[in-house]
Amino acid sequence: MKRKTFWWLIGRLVVPPREFRRKRKRIIGSIVLIALVMIPLVVSILFMESMIQGMTDKYVMLQDGHIQAYDFVLGSDTQLGDERIFSADHSASVFGIAYSKTQTSEVKVKGVYPSYFNEARLQEISIDGTLPEYSGSAVPSVMMSSTTAKTLGVAIGERIALMLVPDSGTISARPVLARIDALYESGYRQIDATLMFMHIDDLLKFNTAGYSKRTEFIVQNESADNLSSVIDSLRQTYNPNIRWATWEAFNRSVYQNFMTSRQVILTVLIMISLVAGTYVSSIAAELVQDSHQSIALLKTLGATSANIHQAFFLTVACTTTLGLIIGMGIGLLLGTRLQSVLLWLAKADIPALRYYLLDFSLKIPWMSLLEVAAALLGISAVTVLIALRRIRKISPLELLQQE
Amino acid sequence: MNEIENVISLRAVGKTFISGETPIHILEDIDFDIQSGQSIAVTGKSGSGKSTLLNIVGTLDRPTTGSVYFQGQDTSTLTDRELSQFRNTNIGFIFQSHLLLDDFNALENVCIPALIKGMRAQQARRRAVELLVRVGLEDRLSHSPLKLSGGERQRIAICRALMNNPPIIIADEPTGSLDEESSQQVADILFELVEEEHKAMLLVTHDRQTAQRCASMYLLQNRSLQRLK
């Protein structure tokens, strides 16, 4: 059979003439069904991947940076020396308890320079008020999250007491009064619940020795998946005795949780697409069943089983691919529209959703989408091939027996 | 007669079906030749084995014993794939209930064997139109078979059988499902075209009148063929 004839035959099977409403409906129904399976899958993947990416960004930007160098202070005139480094900032941190007149809250006070809040970090938080400057007085300026402020029942301009607990057991805890000059909101309660910012010189003024000091590096987006190579390069540039760590090593359990959740959800989504894939084989089986006499006739007229098999396989493949493309398209469209709904949910402060990150920028995870699509296409190809084995068994003689 | 001059030759052909453990002999020791341009009618009672004989001649079924030769070549040596190509090129089939593909219009149905053969679409279309005009269906080219009468559908089936210019036409009760008037028209067209195109024809029919129009006539009885004419 010539390729042209072959495609003509497929075309007729995929788009039967108007007279064959039942056939048309079945093909369109199959496309719609595959699309309907794909839409929630795509939205779920988009939601899951973007949320995990959003949470990771919050941890990286506000809490630890991509890479940390411990007990290492980068001079202001030091060249970064690696194009992959976006920024390097000195920070110190200490755990403590914040007291208002009526409430208390556990906090992690992080000392940073105002320059810490660079373009990348400001994308992750919204700030109301003025960033903490060096006060030089006994009452330093702090920036806390609006979540902590709500817990403590305080507002900008009010004072709180801090009991800072140094890492070193030999240094005793120290009470400090602080003034709230700014409130921030990262949208991620896990961070907002404890993180508080103070000017680093104010923080170190209270006790230099007992606080954890480090330099936080943020790398360019394209190098974020290859941090070990950046560390190798930094090791060569700076003192080889410096202790280096990546954010995932520092937050091992958080990172593992993200990865496990991602893998579990992706596995579930792939399983759903596998079930959808097996459904595709029923389309093939129905198509063969309905075309039984046509297949016998085509064989009588000289078409080989391989020709017919190929034509039916490609028909089902076209149907599946079309459903997949439509489903993905609608899924991506809905996914990108999802953000306004999520923002509304974030503002609604629904208790059940409190620990989800709902304010994040959507990123299309092409690789995960490709994995799910490949799983669907792969399993449908296998199951359809099994279903189409029936074609080989249809004999031209059946045509005459049906007469 | 030289084997090569025969389009189809059956030599000691027998066919036995097994029902449970009981062998049922349908055909026994049949020797039979169809020469180029010759029309042969086979008649017989229902269940006498006419269709089985037709299936064997049309290479749709294989004999239990004996061989079927096409222009001297033993068809039993051909693989299924080769047999498909062989049927496509050398045999035109006409069935009692026309068996057209409803998804395709009249013109496309006629084109199918040529397209399977690998003929260019334009060339196939030209030949199909020519045949359809000859059977008086020039105004039905784009009609679906579902919208045509039984006689018209059978005329399309005749065109389809002749499309690849095969040396032999095998017709199984081609007028069996038609009323008397249509039956007469279809039979006229069939004999006229077969004669014009100089084709051999094996016609299986109950209709004595149609059978009489063939050059030779056989009766299939008691598993063997008896020549009547």
Image: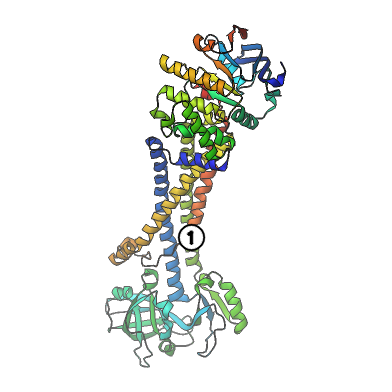
In the image, what residue occupies the spot 47% across and 66% down? A254
For the point 47% across and 29% down, which residue is it? B132
Q: Position of residue A234 (x, y in %)?
A: 58, 80
Q: Position of residue B66 (x, y in %)?
A: 69, 17
In the rendered image, the residue lying farthest to the right is: B2
Q: Is residue A164 above or below residue A331?
A: below
Q: Nearer the viewer, residue A95 or B78?
A: B78
Amino acid bearing label 1: Trp
Q: In the displayed structure, does residue A98 sit left or right of residue A57?
A: left
The local crowd at label 1, few if under 14, some if 14 to 19, many if 20 or more residues have their Cα within 10 Å, is: few
In the image, residue B29 sits, relative to residue A275, either above or below, namely above
Q: Percent x, y for residue A290?
A: 46, 32
Q: Is residue B142 above or below residue B63?
A: below
Picture residue at 50% right of the left edge, 62% below the top: A259
Q: How is the image coloured?
A: rainbow
Q: Position of residue A129 (x, y in %)?
A: 31, 82
Q: Say which quarter of the image contains residue B54.
A: top right
Name the element at disc 1. Answer: helix
Q: Nearer the viewer, residue A261 or A18?
A: A18
Is residue A136 in view from this perspective?
Answer: yes
Quarter of the image with the N terminus of chain A in it: top right
Residue B195 relative to residue B178: left or right? right
Residue A384 visible in image: no
Could you say which is closer to the camera, residue A304 or residue B5?
Answer: B5
Q: Nearer the viewer, residue A272 or B62?
A: B62
Callout count: 1
Q: Quadrant of residue A175?
A: bottom left
Return the residue at label 1.
A366
Please give left or right for residue A184 compared with residue A369 in the image: left
Please report, as a chain letter, where disc 1 is located: A
